[in-house]
Image (tube, grey):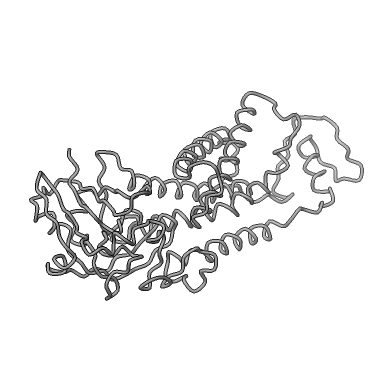
Amino acid sequence: MATVIGRLLGLAFLLCFGTGLYSHFLQQPLPWMTFPTRPAGLYQLTQGTHIVTGIACFPLLLAKLYVVFPQLFQYPPVTSFVNFFERASIALFVGASLVEITIGLLNTYQWYPFPFPFKQVHFALSFVIIGSLLVHIGVKLPLIAAHWRSAPTPGPEERHPVDTVTAEVPTEGLPRTRGLTGRLLSYIDATPNLPARTSRRGFLTTVALAVAAVVGLTAGQTFAPLDAINVFGPRKKGVGQQGVPVNRTSAQAKVATTALASDWVLTVASGGTERSFTRTELLALPQTDVDLPISCVEGWSQMASWRGVRLRDLIDEVGGSPDTDFRLISLEQRGGFKQTEMGHEYVRDELTLVALELNGETLDLEHGYPARMIAPGRPGVLQTKWLSRIEAIDA
């Protein structure tokens, strides 16, 4: 049973780890990295999977602990160096995992009651978990291999006792069978069945229902078919200004005054050339309509219709190179995403817009008025709101 649950838990952790790395490097790419812009909802899928598998780890981890609970308190606590290595890896894995999935869940609600920075600790703990998991698997590999495809226990008629030892065991009232192995098997067969903590079928059913419940009741914030049963997800599709949820408000960003100012302009700069556009001038340029989702790191997403100017057209206005990356600067003065960077693969994509309208209406202040960025396959935190300046990043 530990192997069965371990397979599922290992798969959940690996999916969570892989999709988490993708999200991390989208936000903090290494210099050589480029990313796919298709399918347009790629980040919606990867981050939704990240949150769903992270939530599924709660019942799976508790189930695994339930199965191995008696072994956690064995005596003596350590019997050899290998045993110490094994138990240390288990302690590290369990402790790090519980902290990781707990703070990850709290992050989906944007609640940070802990005294350390979430993003850095969450990233570091993921490597601790995978490392300790690999150590644990390595130590337990012989036992895992033995049980990976375990066959049903054979009946008495299928057993073939080995007649090699003559040590005596209590046999009074038991069928006569020659050899130690046969006598032990007969003794086991004749031992009254002791009450189990729970039945195997009942246990697996409970675990399956728990996973289905925690996943099914939250995944609707990402996956539209489950929206009707989204009970625990922090965001609900269609709820928010212009039918789209909002994470960071204009009040939190303190941008209302500057965003609504009559002298607002968007400045685009590349290679020593700058040009400023008023909102009226942006609206006078050729407009493009696209359907793209807002997909946030907290796991929720919402498809929406956007209208605005293609970013590559604005870059061409200042002679920008096709291979140049750009920096997006917001009106907000504080926050980790007041400035973001956009790789050239997104800059040149035909779906990337400086959006001026949302769902057929003028962009609401909460969604980034007077102008915001929208691009395919990008996290919501990188879809910069309240744009002020777009400038080339010097190589």
Q: Residue furthest right?
A: 172
In the picture, the quarter occupied by the C terminus is top left
Q: Position of residue 156 (x, y in %)?
A: 74, 49
Q: Relative to 194, does residue 40 appear above or below in the rendering?
A: below
x and y percent of residue 84 in the render? 64, 27
- 358 horizontally vs 127: left or right: left
In the depicted structure, whether residue 242 falls above or below residue 185: below
In this orientation, which residue lies closer to the viewer: 44 or 274?
274
At x 29%, y 39%, the residue is 30
Q: Residue furthest top?
A: 81
Give the vertical position of 74 relative to 203 (above or below).
above
Q: Does residue 75 appear to the left or right of 219 in the view shown?
A: right
Q: Nearer the viewer, residue 288 or 389?
A: 389
Residue 45 screen position, x and y as percent: 38, 59
Q: How many marks can you see? A: 0
Residue sitting at x 79%, y 34%:
180
The reply, left or right, for residue 308 in relation to residue 44 is: left
Q: Residue visible at 70% across and 26% down?
A: 79
Residue 81, given in percent of the width and then of the height, sits at: 63, 23
Residue 379, quarter of the rendered image = bottom left
Question: Which sits in the foreground, 103 or 111?
Answer: 111
In the foreground, 89 or 137: 89
Q: Is residue 359 left or right of residue 219?
A: left
Q: Residue furthest bottom?
A: 360
